[in-house]
Image (cartoon, rainbow, N blue to C red):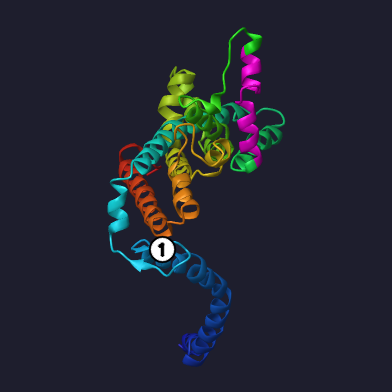
Amino acid sequence: MSVLGELRSSRKAASGPRARGGLRRGDGRAAALFLAPWFAGLLLITAGPMVASGYLSLTNYNLLQPPEWIGLDNYSRMLEDPRLLNSLQVTFTYVFVSVPLQLAAALALALLLDRGLKGLAIYRSVYYLPSLLGGSVAIAILWRQVFGSDGLVNQVLAFFGVQGQGWVSHPDYALGTLMALNVWTFGAPMVIFLAGLRQIPQMYYEAASIDGAGKIRQFRSITVPLLTPIIFFNLVLQVINAFQTFTQAYVVSGGTGGPADSTMFYTLYLYQRGFGALDMGYASAMAWLLLAIVAGMTAVNFLASKYWVFYND
């Protein structure tokens, strides 16, 4: 009993009000110190501009005069803006075509690299490099030259006796060149796919081989189901990134969204309205519409994931 009494008294002393109070005060100061930069960034860089943008979306503001309250007029104008509706069509086409092709290319390369090639780190770095440079101005300029009238693509076609054309200057093909650029930047999802493939136990493939399943059947019945969480993760990220595409369209089209508004992405039109026409109130309303679209697409992906994403449990 004496031993138990000593243990109880030591526990009470260690957890007494003075000890608890000292730990709480010390931890609180340290937590406040380390969290202060994050809270400052949240208020000054994220929350503050969002509140200001929400207010400006309800005003007529041209950066030169004080905002004039107009209510929901900016949002009603969107329904009668043909260029905005065209930009939405271009953006949705870009997202729904380029993102699946990008993920397919990333998965194919990940499967190839997962075979244990020599110099895997070098190949992985080389394939990941386009993802680092794909959103840069230099790569967009290079892409414009590659698909230009005298670019590399037409030179290759001329070698086979095929007459080329200015791909970036043709309304029917300009958007396709930007899709190809987005597919080319498959490095980031490829690395994530490769990490997911390395987490699949080999015993599943060994058991399937014993049962007589071929490589295609193993891919359909083992690889794809166990990789669906990774596919879902990459899908959500790449859809969000694709809706925010701006640099490529701006550089390739020269900031006009041409030819014939075929590359007029939503973000590019938002930039033109805000900083070209100084219609900042309308641009703010467009920004909130883009936020609603991205949030809606993300919500749809999460709701649909329960039908095709499979976890270990």
**Image: 100 above or below 213:** below
Residue at 47%, 64% in the rendered image:
63
Q: Is residue 91 left or right of residue 19?
A: left
**Is residue 143 one of those drawn in magenta?**
yes
Residue in the picture at 46% in, 20% down: 216
- Foreground: 26 or 136? 136
- Could you classify mark 1 by the number of other residues whose Cα lies within 10 Å: few (under 14), some (14-19), or many (20 or more)? many
Front one among 234 and 151: 151
Magenta run includes residue 270 = no
Which part of the image, by quadrant, shows the N terminus? Answer: bottom left
Answer with left or right where residue 139 lies relative to residue 176. Answer: right
Residue 31: quadrant of the picture:
bottom right
The residue sitting at the bottom extreme is 18
Residue with the mark numbered 1: 61
Q: Which x, y percent locates residue 120?
A: 68, 33
**Can residue 283 be seen from the camera position used here?**
yes
Instruction: Identify the residue at the far front of this view.
Output: 65
Estimate the x, y position of residue 255 in percent, counting from the top left. 54, 42
The secondary structure that most of the magenta stretch takes on is: helix
Q: Residue at x 58, y 11 (%)?
A: 163
- Which structural element holds mark 1? loop
Tally the numbered discs: 1
Q: Position of residue 47 (x, y in %)?
A: 44, 67
Q: Looking at the picture, how far across and down is residue 44, in whole percent?
A: 51, 70
Amino acid type of the residue that numbered disc 1 sits on in the rendered structure? Tyr
Q: Is residue 4 left or right of residue 139?
A: left
View extreme (top): residue: 161
Find the magenta span and give its range.
Answer: 138-157
Q: Is residue 10 above or below residue 236?
A: below
Is residue 284 shown above or below 122? below
Q: Can residue 10 be seen in the rendering of this structure?
A: no
Q: Which of the 4 image quadrants contains residue 122? A: top right
